Image (tube, helix red, strand yellow):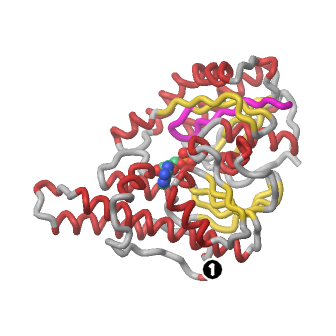
Amino acid sequence: MVKILGIETSCDETAVAVAEDGVHVLGNAIASSAEMHGLIGGVVPEVAAREQLKAILPVIDLAMAQAKTDWNAIDAIAVTNGPGLISSLLVGVNVAATLAYIHKKPLIPIHHIAGHIYANFLDGAAPVSFPFLVLTVSGGHNELILVRDHFDFQKIGETIDDAAGEAFDKVARLLGLGYPGGPPISKWAEKGNPKAFDFPRSHLDPNHRFDFSFSGLKTAVMRAIVGARHALPLPNGAMTDAVKADLAASFQQAVVDILSDKLADAAREYDVSIVHLAGGVSANRLLRQEVRKKLPPDVALCSPQNLKYCTDNGAMIAGAGYFFSQKYPLPNNSWSTIRANANLEFPIYNFH
Ligand code: KG4
Ligand code: ZN
């Protein structure tokens, strides 16, 4: 049994977990400044990092207590070393490196997106089986990746502008629905008509068949909001709940159509029998439904077992850390070589 402590601080969460053999979550704790950022409508990096600095040691203690474990029983520490907000990454990486030094444990660097991919194995949600195609879709990332084996990734598509989660967050802000935008938009969408507004589905030219673009959609939604406000006889640019719900439903449908069409197309092209959804937007119910509908019935569709493993969490880092260390064992002094990198490329593994 290998126990790994995973630390994730790449955005506004301070998330720590203990997992055994990469799949069994023993303790999982999280502190978020999302409420504070909800008041502002987005993440302010310095505010996030200051909160993370205050939260990280208590959150580590909590995860260890939940797992009923102590430092002697921990085999290694895994930490997100990028990409993300540099001030936030530095908190996690420096604390993890200090603990690795003090307790003489290997420090394992995990790319944030690799973490999201490994979230799908937690608590037995998906079999640890290859190859598979994964759509990683979050606030900062929107990629199609072919995973041939552990830490053997081939990126086949990415966004040329915004990520889908970012579009959810921006549209929610325009509609005054707070941050993060995904959950309130899908809630409002339940009451709206997805065909009320005909928003563009950018499918790009054949050279970018598996790439994504959401900036045109965002602009179209902004124009529709302005237009709707002008059309309504309400003061101060107010909007009726019915129009808000229609805008949310039509926007969500457009994002889901783009994501699910490309994913199904790529699954056919690469002839895979397993497809994964990973990252914060994989929590979206309509996305899961539409992807299921568009994939052939014999293709398995996997997503995190629990919604808390869709968005940023420490368990996915502990899980990825286990499989990484099985493939590339690291010495107890690896902490001295690991640095936070806001623009960490995907994937860079130099431990062959
Ligand atoms: O993976 P994550 O926690 O952080 C990043 O790595 O970016 O993803 C957060 C993103 C946010 O943009 C949030 O609006 C989106 O995931 N999200 C959703 C849903 N839940 C979270 N988007 C659509 N539908 C949801 N139910
Ligand atoms: Zn994430």
Asked if residue 140 shows in the view, the reply is: no
Read off the residue under disc 1: 207
Q: Position of 344 compared to 176: left or right?
A: right
The part of the image, by quadrant, that contains residue 336 is top right
Residue 149 visible somewhere in the drawing: yes
Quick one: 36 or 189, which is closer to the camera? 189
Q: Label 1 is placed on what type of residue? A: Asn
**Residue visible at 61% across and 65% down?**
158
Any magenta on residue 3?
yes
Outermost residue toward the front in this view: 297
Position of 108 with respect to 221 (left or right) is right
Screen quadrant of the N terminus:
top right
Q: Is residue 44 above or below residue 59?
A: below
Residue 22 lies in the magenta-colored region: no
Q: Which residue corresponds to the image point at 64% horizontal and 46% vertical from the top-left?
A: 305
How many numbered discs sit on the rendered protein? 1
Left or right for 275, reference 86: right
Which x, y percent locates residue 164?
A: 50, 59
Residues shaded magenta: 1-14
Residue 155 lies, with reference to residue 93, above or below; the image says below
